[in-house]
Amino acid sequence: MMKYIQNIQMLNEQGELVSTSITIENKVIANIGGEQPDGAEVIDGNGCFVSPGFVDLHVHLREPGFEHKETIETGTKSAAKGGFTTICAMPNTKPVPDSIENLNLIMGLIEESAVVRVLPYGSLTVNEAGEKRTNIAELKEHGAVAFSDDGIGIQLSSTMYEQMQDAAKIDAVVVAHCEDNSLIYDGVMHEGIRNKELGLPGIPSICESVQIARDVLLAEAAGARYHVCHVSSKESVRAVRDAKAAGIRVTAEVCPHHLLLEEMDIPSDDANWKMNPPLRGKSDLDSLHQALLDGTIDCIATDHAPHTEEEKCCGMVGAPFGIVGFETAFPLLYTNFVITKKWTLKQLVDWMSVKPAEIFDLPYGKIEVGGSADLTIIDLNKEQTIEIEKFESKGRNTPFNGWKAKGWPIMTICGGNVVYEEVINEK
Ligand SMILES: [Zn+2]
């Protein structure tokens, strides 16, 4: 079956929007800018923008084990609605993908119910317990996209070092949630100004930055490729910048919320503002922006982390860390940073599609003839209020409820299949 998308705007090499058409045949892009082929199903883009489908290196789908928070079905529907076509699922599920058996089980569930492409991580340690190392070569052979114990930092340097040595042998990427357990101090938000005003325990920035500093040195010694999750502080940015300058093979991601919010924005002891790492100070936020623009930080990842309302209802202490991210990422970033001319549209697309695919050597994230037909059609002029009641995700935990934003995905195509289409109300 062929599809012909007509009347759409695509970015050219110079970052300008140009009108074009795209022909899809057998899951791949067969032609760009060509005539309508006979017998093709025609999709009218109505002059909207077409982006390569977004690629998210950092998401939590909660299944298996925590289906009350999210399932692979609801999580991937949420991803599709947000314009994501390839997502990498973190291994803090039950069971953890720490063996071939568990990885196969998870891949079977993905096969059954995912509506977009889900690439599972393998864990770095058995049961993410930080002790016994997993066999990452074996896990990679069976389909693990990369390796991480996301949710917790690897405390023992030797464990990290030895897994990096194994990863280097097979050219796998070690991905790290950096958190030194001895520096958490039972904190629930950033150790700064606002936590004192609210009387809540703080997590200092060094909790993250010292482990990044350790890891880049381990990566250098092991010759490994190392990717830092959700960089949140200026000291962490400096550690990554220095490592890159030294030629260490490090890449890094930042989350939309760390670019949009800082500690003083937290209105009250509300767990919808609780995430790990926490929202830090204004100088940290500024440093993250600078790092994206100068290439120290390579890409944007949502860290989509759904939880139930019951879990998030009763203040920061006791609530789990994390917020949902798929359905708000693009409109929030587009509205706050592209419309305001801080970034170009091309930069945003690079950070959400091109770069994340490159970091994991994935054949996605670009619109090119012969490439997978992963496309997100976005109405850049459409303005709408974020309403948690309308989320596809089971998670309603976000600080962005009620925010107005422009630039909403109206159709998402993954491997040539329409996986999300906006329901147009009859007028
Ligand atoms: Zn994490």
Image (tube, rainbow, N blue to C red):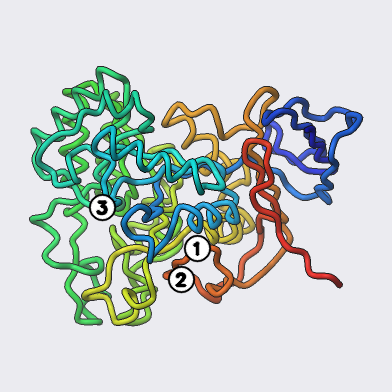
**Which image quadrant for residue 313?**
bottom left
Element type where label 1 sits in the image: loop
- Inspect the image, locate mark 3, and give the three-letter code of the amino acid beneath it: Gly
Element type where label 3 sits in the image: loop
Single out the mark in the foreground, 1 or 3: 1
Q: Residue furthest top?
A: 169
What is the quadrant of the N terminus in the image?
Answer: top right
Image disc number at residue 45 = none
Element type where label 2 sits in the image: loop
**Residue at mark 2:** 396
Q: CA distance from mark 1 to mark 3?
A: 20 Å
**Residue at mark 3:** 151
Q: CA distance from mark 3 to mark 2?
A: 20 Å
Asked if disc 1 and disc 2 are in contact, CB closer than 8 Å, the reply is yes
The reply, left or right, for residue 47 in relation to residue 247 is: right
Q: Residue at x 77, y 50 (%)?
A: 48
Dot 3 crowding, Cα within 10 Å, few <14, some 14–19, many 20+:
some
Q: Residue at x 42, y 61 (%)?
A: 70
